[in-house]
Image (spheres, coloured by chain):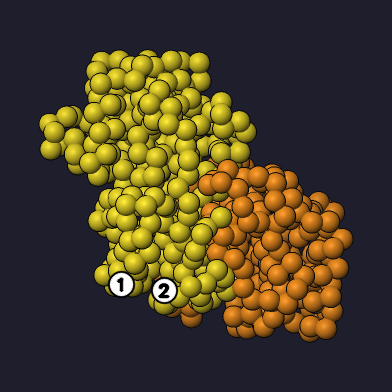
Chain colours: A yellow, B orange
Amino acid sequence: MSLRSWINGIPGTQITVEDRGLQYGDGVFETMAVRTGRIVLLDLHLQRLEDSCRRLSIALPPIDLIRDELHATAHDQQRAVLKLIVTRGTGGRGYRPVTLPPTRILTLHEWPDYPANWWQDGIRARVCNTTLGSNSALAGIKHLNRLEQVLARAEWHDDDDIQEGLMTDSSGLVIEGTMTNLFVRLADGQWVTPDLHACGVAGVMRRYILERSKLERVTIRSGKLNVSDIQSASEIFVCNSVIGVWPVRQLENWKYKVGEMTRRIQQWFGDA
Amino acid sequence: MSLRSWINGIPGTQITVEDRGLQYGDGVFETMAVRTGRIVLLDLHLQRLEDSCRRLSIALPPIDLIRDELHATAHDQQRAVLKLIVTRGTGGRGYRPVTLPPTRILTLHEWPDYPANWWQDGIRARVCNTTLGSNSALAGIKHLNRLEQVLARAEWHDDDDIQEGLMTDSSGLVIEGTMTNLFVRLADGQWVTPDLHACGVAGVMRRYILERSKLERVTIRSGKLNVSDIQSASEIFVCNSVIGVWPVRQLENWKYKVGEMTRRIQQWFGDA
């Protein structure tokens, strides 16, 4: 449940049922962490938002307007989550998209109180049976078509036991978690994060880690990962903008140590 | 734009932005034709609705309640379209679905005035570049994750020139139109409609045609179709519950005659 919400900059909680966001999932979103009045990784969020809207031909309002609204909402929050949805708007005949005034929906949420030991000691994850369909036209975009994640997240019920599920594409390549991206240190010592050209969400935290790793001269490549590569891996973590970096201590029945590089990347998140 | 709308049986045009239908496309819909106060193929629509909600674990209200609401809305309409959306409701933490009171959104729309010659002489169609991702967990369901159709429908702008686009899966198999199902008479005389186990929407009109064809001892099989199979086909039509049956007179640069069987199946729609 959200604490407060705004529709196109005006306090409100309702949208018309004819909005294409509801009718077709025709929109995108960003989920942002607020710490001491500041939005973490804001520029990367805004860049992804612009990129996603351009790819879907959604007429994003001026980015400075959006930035101002986000700042106005965040500035008096110690810890919170901001979610911004931008839909294509209301109209068009059937699926056919036309250029419309988009709908922006901003909601402010309480900080989710994840147990500290998930960050410290790591989480337990599973491999989901629900797979991801591949479509390069949508790959990378954080869009509103999220039924695959909903079905995957329905596969387990006990949050204390399992905290995240990894999803594969239909050929068995591991792509991401239901709400996170994935980084793996393979048995040969190489760090890999799954390639997202065919499916998956290109997370802002993932991008931050990849950019920071270049500055720090740490090699992380984007590539293909099978479940068996992960079984034999020495270190795994999942990440997103809100949780930061969670080590994976157990995936299915395979156990992993929290390594030095995972600890270092957790510090990068502290810097963000 | 809708003429009238109801939320959970009460006149209204707005839903909360926290509804999972907007947040994740977490819901399903039916689009129904109304003729002289009667909903065409109502039982098949209700069966698909029940089946879709069961597959997604959405707690559908009693089907008799839905049937009564549909009848009450349709009975004084000469010609109209009814669209019923059922979402999982409002709540749950993140993607995780829990059992919630679902939201049902019923909208009444004007009958779309498609030119009569599309039915009579046939339409022109294209093969879309936008492909369909495969996911057997979602295949067949008319769910609210429709961005692939939105992107495909954005590929052409002139409705007078092109009336429908066919979509393939990532391996090149032809699955459906953006808003229709597809039937093809191959060069060898066999009738085929694409298999929908991996992707596509199992249309109510498609099902009616398949069931009626058995009664009429007409053999139509569900199978795999490549674009080249369709290029060499002798007869093609597309169908849905609202348009009925549109012959395809031209696909890309290939031309087709409107055959005897297409005419016969158009009559079946008249009976529906």
- Left or right, A262 with respect to B111, comes to left
Q: Which labelled disc corresponds to residue A65?
A: 1
Residue at left offset 48%, top offset 80%: B160
Q: Can residue A103 be seen in the rendering of this structure? A: no
Q: State whether residue B267 is above or below residue B224.
A: below
Q: Which mark is residue A9?
A: 2
For the N terminus of chain A, which image quadrant?
bottom right
* Residue B266 screen position, x and y as percent: 73, 69
Q: Please state which amino acid type lies under the numbered disc 2.
A: Gly
The quadrant in which residue B20 appears is bottom right
User: In this rendering, would B186 be left or right of B130?
Assistant: right
**Is residue A33 shown above or below A6?**
above
> Could one spot residue A20 in this view of the protein?
yes
Residue B74, image x, y percentages: 80, 77
Q: What is the spatial separation of the Cα atoms under label 1 and label 2, in whole angstroms?
A: 9 Å
Judging from the image, what secondary structure is the residue with disc 1 in? Answer: helix
Amino acid identity at mark 1: Leu
Asked which quadrant contains residue A55, the reply is bottom left
Instruction: Check if mark 1's residue and mark 2's residue have beta carbons within 8 Å.
Output: yes
Horizontal and vertical percent position of residue B22: 55, 61
At 76% across and 54% down in the image, what residue appears?
Answer: B60
Using the image, name the chain to which the residue with label 1 belongs. A
